[in-house]
Image: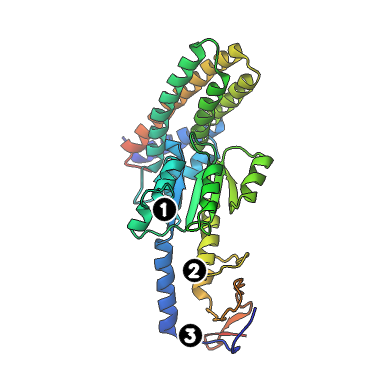
Amino acid sequence: MARVGGGVRQRNKSEKTEISNRLCLDMQQFHVLAVDDSFVDRKVIERLLKISSCTVTVVDSGKRALQFLGLDEEESYAESNGLKVHLIITDYSMPGMTGYELLKRIKESSMFREVPVVIMSSENILTRIARCMEEGAKEYIVKPLRLSDVKRLTEFIMTSHSMGVKGKESPKLSIPEIHNAIFVEYPCFSTECEYILPPNLHKRSSGDHSQLTLQ
Amino acid sequence: MNTRFLQQQIAQLRKSFFEQGYLDEQFIQLEELEDDDNPNFVEEVVTSYFSDSARLIRNIDQALVKRPVDFDKLDDYMHQFKGSSSSIGAKKVVDECLQFREYCAARNAEGCMKTFEMIKQEHALLRKKLEAYFQLVNSAGGI
């Protein structure tokens, strides 16, 4: 990873507020497409995602998911409404098109292959999990889904998203930590840019929080 | 009716569901998704579950009567039924579903039929209990 200049730009209070506001906006605009053929599970996943501050679109089949994304050769509903999709979470066992088949279609598309796809299943079958991960699933979650699963998942993906990281691994941060973080600008010259959160963040001893500095 | 007494009744009734194994942790997970903007979420999900599962029960009943028995279809229906039962924390119902799927895998039609009678009983019982519970909750103006 190449670095140009080497300095850390300190941000003043108004810039920090602006970043904070932008983050809050990002979180609200974090759009998840959820796919499940079960009526009950759709209700639950929708609520879980909304409570985790996401915008949610729920569909009942892989076919409808593809329609929404515009991958079934029809015009994309999402695109035509300016709705970017940041995460796709799908049930595995669905009639017609399984979650695995949907995953494959998404990974085959140039438009959506970067969108993280999470598989949900009531069955904890190792070969199934391996297949999904091999095909590029971000994670495989065993049902029934809990709030902690969704929170962990969305926070992790949100941080990758908001920091614009394209690397393989992003640091796991809690939302409060993001708000207090200094955004260090490292111009990247490689396609793999690893974002490193400064490990030693400290506040000035005077208690003035208008400026946070890096040790 | 005295609100405090009513609330005590509600709390006791709720507690009994867990102690007697009718409901499990997943029900609590749903309760935690309720807030001021969505104060009836659990009742809504439970209502959806009972109307949806009634449909699945009809399908399974029909499939059990057909000869020869289509075990794959039965298993498929039961997978769906078990899934949504699990999503609301209907522990006793889920346990019976697991039993059913074992009989299905063993191609044991009689076992399936016997177990399905149990499932319907547990399902109906849970429905009665939860209806009574939500009636109490609503009469107390929510918890």
The tag on residue A118 is none
Q: Earlier in the sequence, mark 1 or mark 2?
A: 1
Number of marks drawn: 3
Q: Nearer the viewer, residue B132 or A72?
A: A72
Tag 1 residue: A50
Local packing at callout 2 (Cα closer than 10 Å; few below 14, some 14-19, many 20+) is some
Residue for badge 3: A11
Horizontal side, residue B79 vs residue B135: left or right: right
If the image is split into quadrants, where does the C terminus of chain A sit? bottom right
The subunit carrying tag 2 is A
For marks 1 and 2, give the CA distance. Answer: 18 Å
Q: Vertically, is A39 above or below A192?
A: above
Question: Label for residue A162?
Answer: 2
Q: Earlier in the sequence, mark 3 or mark 2?
A: 3
> Nearest the camera: B36 or B139?
B36
Marked residue chain, label 1:
A
- Residue A146 in view, yes or no: no
